[in-house]
């Protein structure tokens, strides 16, 4: 209070009385309070049902992964490729807003999603990206070809880089379990990729050359999308992360603003004055999500387990989930190698 960071020291009941006084109520009157998220959810969306023209809003939230999902919470290329094709085939959709909140993930999955985004653009319709808390590595990979990119001043983006995780258990097995391996090789690379043998110098070169090629391809895609040279991108790449305001000054994003700003830009680029929005993926209601957990026998146990872990771990659940994501990672990754927790 002395530093003028707060106005007064008070108990909760005193704060409530101050609120009553400010809005003209008596101390005995009741005040109905709601949480910030309830206030946000109660906003009435402006939907002009008289207009056939639509702007699609696609939410890419979570780690980018290969395949199809059995539960909500991540970006699986199988699901997103299907949604993007559906969006592209809908002639009433005149623009796409991609809302990205992802630390990245699989390079292959990111490439498949980016391919569909470019196919949408090839029809002459604009794509605008709105970055949330984090849009880095694979999250930037799927964003880089957009006609316009918006970020918040404190959005974390960039992290243009790739890495591979390849376990080698030879020393672990010997030192901890006393187990050693032997083999008869039929060729120079016949045991290549086996987790029980260290890589030879030639095998290490093969792996490194593949990672280098993917990194160069990443640089090329960003350079094309942002109208920069390869060397200009490399200067600000190499895995480094940038806040949104700095990302704007170095050319990784076009301007600062939230989802509403991105929507306005998409409408302007598409030449729309009247439009309605359609959102992907469709958010299931609470009861629908609950029924899925109970009735989907294939993933019921894992789904319920994650549900319980999320409630038990609270703020620590994202760190646990990141460890599990790394454990399940396949192939070369374009993602943040750590967990960013913005509070």
Image: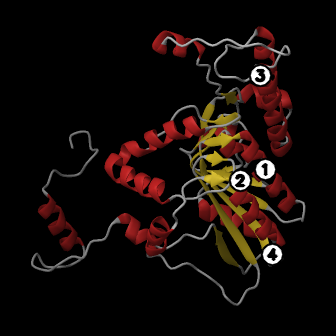
Circle on res. 112: 1
Circle on res. 72: none
Return the residue at label 2: 77
Query: Residue placed at 74% from the left, 78% from the top?
Result: 273
Most extreme residue toward the left, as rendered? 28
Contact flag, marks 4 and 1 (Cβ < 8 Å): no
Numbered disc in front, either 1 or 3: 3
- The crowding category of the residue bearing disc 3, from other C-alpha atoms within 10 Å (few below 14, some 14 to 19, many at least 20), is some
Question: In the image, residue 195 lies at what x, y percent?
Answer: 65, 22
Task: State the CA–CA distance, disc 4 to disc 1.
Answer: 20 Å
Return the residue at label 4: 90
Return the residue at label 3: 207
Contact flag, marks 1 and 2 (Cβ < 8 Å): yes
Q: Secondary structure at mark 3?
A: helix
109 with respect to 315 (left or right): right
- Work out whether mark 1 precedes mark 3 in sequence or the reverse, and give the earlier one: 1
Q: Secondary structure at mark 2?
A: helix
- Work out whether mark 4 precedes mark 1 in sequence or the reverse, and give the earlier one: 4
Query: Residue placed at 73% from the left, 40% from the top?
Result: 107
Q: Secondary structure at mark 1?
A: helix
Question: In the image, residue 243 lies at what x, y percent?
Answer: 58, 39
Question: In the image, residue 62 lies at what x, y percent?
Answer: 57, 50
């Amino acid at each position: 209070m002395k530093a003028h960071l707060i106005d007064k020291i008070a108990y909760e009941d005193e704060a409530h009385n101050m609120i009553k006084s400010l809005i003209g109520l008596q101390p005995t009157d009741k005040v109905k309070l709601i949480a910030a998220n309830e206030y946000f959810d109660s906003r009435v969306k402006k939907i002009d049902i008289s207009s056939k023209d639509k702007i699609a809003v696609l939410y890419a939230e979570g780690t980018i992964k290969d395949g199809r999902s059995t539960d909500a919470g991540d970006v699986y290329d199988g699901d997103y490729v299907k949604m993007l094709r559906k969006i592209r085939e809908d002639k009433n959709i005149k623009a796409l807003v991609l809302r990205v909140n992802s630390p990245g993930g699989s390079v292959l999955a990111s490439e498949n999603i980016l391919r569909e985004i470019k196919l949408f653009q090839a029809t002459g319709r604009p794509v605008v990206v709105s970055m949330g808390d984090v849009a880095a590595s694979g999250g930037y990979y799927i964003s880089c070809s957009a006609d316009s990119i918006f970020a918040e001043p404190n959005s974390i983006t960039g992290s243009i880089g790739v890495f591979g995780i390849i376990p080698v258990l030879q020393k672990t097995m010997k030192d901890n379990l006393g187990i050693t391996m032997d083999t008869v090789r039929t060729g120079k690379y016949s045991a290549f990729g086996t987790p029980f043998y260290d890589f030879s110098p030639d095998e290490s070169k093969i792996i490194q050359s593949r990672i280098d090629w993917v990194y160069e391809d990443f640089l090329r895609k960003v350079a094309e999308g942002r109208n920069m040279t390869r060397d200009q991108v490399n200067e600000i790449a190499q895995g480094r992360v940038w806040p949104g305001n700095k990302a704007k000054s170095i050319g990784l994003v076009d301007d600062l603003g939230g989802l509403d700003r991105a929507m306005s830009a998409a409408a302007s680029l598409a030449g729309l004055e009247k439009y309605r929005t359609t959102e992907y993926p469709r958010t299931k209601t609470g009861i629908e999500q609950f029924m899925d957990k109970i009735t989907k026998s294939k993933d019921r146990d894992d789904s319920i387990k994650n549900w319980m872990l999320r409630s038990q771990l609270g703020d620590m659940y994202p760190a646990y989930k990141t460890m599990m994501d790394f454990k399940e990672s396949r192939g070369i990754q374009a993602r943040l190698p750590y967990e960013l927790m913005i509070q």
